[in-house]
Amino acid sequence: MSTPTGFMEYKRELPNDRDPLERIKDWNEFHKMFSEEQLRTQGARCMDCGTPYCHTGMELAGNASGCPINNLIPEWNNLVYRGLWKEAYERLAKTNNFPEWTGRVCPAPCEGSCTVGLIGDAVTIKTIEQAIIDRAFEEGWVVPQPPKARTGKKVAVVGSGPPDLRQPLSLIKRGTR
Ligand code: SF4
């Protein structure tokens, strides 16, 4: 757990986006990012729940709940809080092939499932995810990880969004394709 009372001490905050009238003029990033101190404060709001609904992708009463790729959210929230960014990236990369996308475009069912949301505002999971992967690219931690042996099998990717790409890669990792 980051801090036992962090969710009571600190408010949920999100960085501002660039003004829409400005950002339509270019293709540059429109999400602004928090400072390291702000990110660590947001990480401090995570309670490291015994049953982390944020991380547990499942269906409850016909509704999607939690992260569909089971990101290890409480672990990397805590690592960011402690300033251990490389370790946070290594945890994130264990379950997510494309955090640079999901940290930006995912609708974040993890936040909708966050236990803190029962009594206040959910932890800013998606912003922290984006910060981890952006930092990993800046630091040069994202490097190719070629397989030790290639199977010679081919994969057809239908569609171009993160789900289309994530699924076959996940199956390959599990050795089912
Ligand atoms: S549900 Fe919210 S408070 Fe609990 S572990 Fe997940 S992010 Fe942290």
Image (spheres, rainbow, N blue to C red):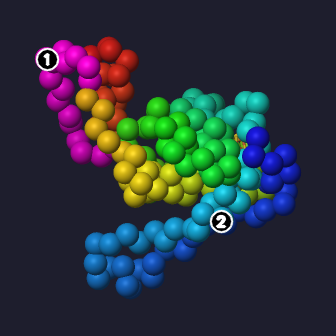
Pointer 1 or 2: first along the chain: 2
Which stretch did the figure color magenta?
Answer: 147-162
Which amino acid, mark 1? Gly
Q: Considering the numbered disc 1 on the image, is that residue within a helix, a strand or a loop?
A: loop
Mark 1: few, some, or many residues within 10 Å (few <14, many ≥20)? few
* 120 or 146, nearer to the observer: 146
Q: Is residue 111 visible?
A: no
Q: Measuring from the top left, give residue 87's x and y in whole percent.
A: 55, 41
Q: Is residue 68 left or right of residue 152?
A: right
* Residue at the spot of label 2: 38
Tag 2, which secondary structure? helix
Residue that numbered label 1 is attached to: 152
**173 in the magenta segment:** no
Q: Is residue 147 shown to the viewer in this render? A: yes
- Does residue 80 sit above or below 16 in this rendering? above
In percent of the image, x 28 and y 38: which residue is there?
144
